[in-house]
């Protein structure tokens, strides 16, 4: 299995609309990518850094899991522009992305 990790940095001037992300963006991702092989969406909201009193490095870390690299690539080729285009509706930071092998 492979996953696309999408990380949203937490900066001093960042804004992240969690309600929009959970109620609109995440369902859109599932609607578009599930028919193309998406098997899991794992959402991790940042609470703190390395200690409870330090800020989280990321507001949200999302992992989108697919069975194969081909399914991931097809999903991004088909709906990536739409999904990435929705990001400014909930945050003013540029998401970082990384493809990972699930172990």
Image (spheres, grey):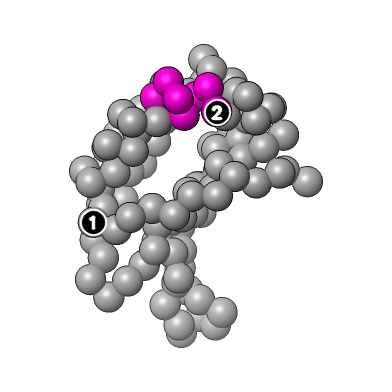
Residue occupying image coordinates x 72% and y 43%:
102
Residue 11 place in picture, x, y as percent: 32, 71
**Viewed as shown, does residue 12 lie left or right of 27?**
left
Which label number is shown at residue 92? 1
Figure quadrant of the N terminus: top right
Separation (CA) of disc 2 from disc 1: 26 Å
Secondary element under disc 1, as helix, strand or loop, is loop
Q: Is residue 83 magenta?
A: no
**Viewed as shown, does residue 42 lie left or right of 60?**
right
Is 11 drawn above or below residue 39 in the view shown? Answer: below
Q: As rendered, which of 30 and 22 lies closer to the eye?
A: 30
Residue occupying image coordinates x 55% and y 49%:
98
Is 22 drawn above or below residue 45 in the view shown? Answer: above
Q: As rendered, which of 33 and 47 lies closer to the eye?
A: 33
Q: Residue furthest right?
A: 103
Residue occupying image coordinates x 45% and y 82%:
54
Residue 49, can we see it? yes
| Image marks 2 and 1: residues in contact by CB distance under 8 Å | no
**Viewed as shown, does residue 64 lie left or right of 45?**
right
Extent of the magenta region: 73-79
Is 82 drawn above or below residue 57 in the view shown? Answer: above
Q: Which residue is mark 2?
A: 73
**Prevailing secondary structure of the magenta residues:** helix
Secondary element under disc 2, as helix, strand or loop, is helix
Badge 1 local density, few (<14 within 10 Å), some, or many (20+)?
some
The tag earlier along the polypeptide, 2 or 1, is 2
**Viewed as shown, does residue 41 lie left or right of 15?**
right
């Amino acid at each position: 299995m492979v996953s696309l990790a999408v990380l949203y940095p937490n900066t001093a001037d960042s804004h992240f609309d969690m309600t929009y992300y959970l109620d609109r963006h995440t369902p859109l991702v599932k609607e578009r990518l599930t028919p193309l092989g998406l098997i899991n969406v794992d959402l991790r909201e940042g609470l703190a850094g390395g200690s409870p009193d330090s800020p989280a490095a990321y507001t949200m870390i999302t992992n989108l899991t697919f069975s194969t690299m081909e399914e991931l690539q097809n999903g991004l080729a088909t709906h990536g522009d739409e999904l990435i285009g929705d990001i400014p509706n909930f945050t003013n930071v540029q998401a970082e992305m990384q493809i990972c092998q699930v172990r």
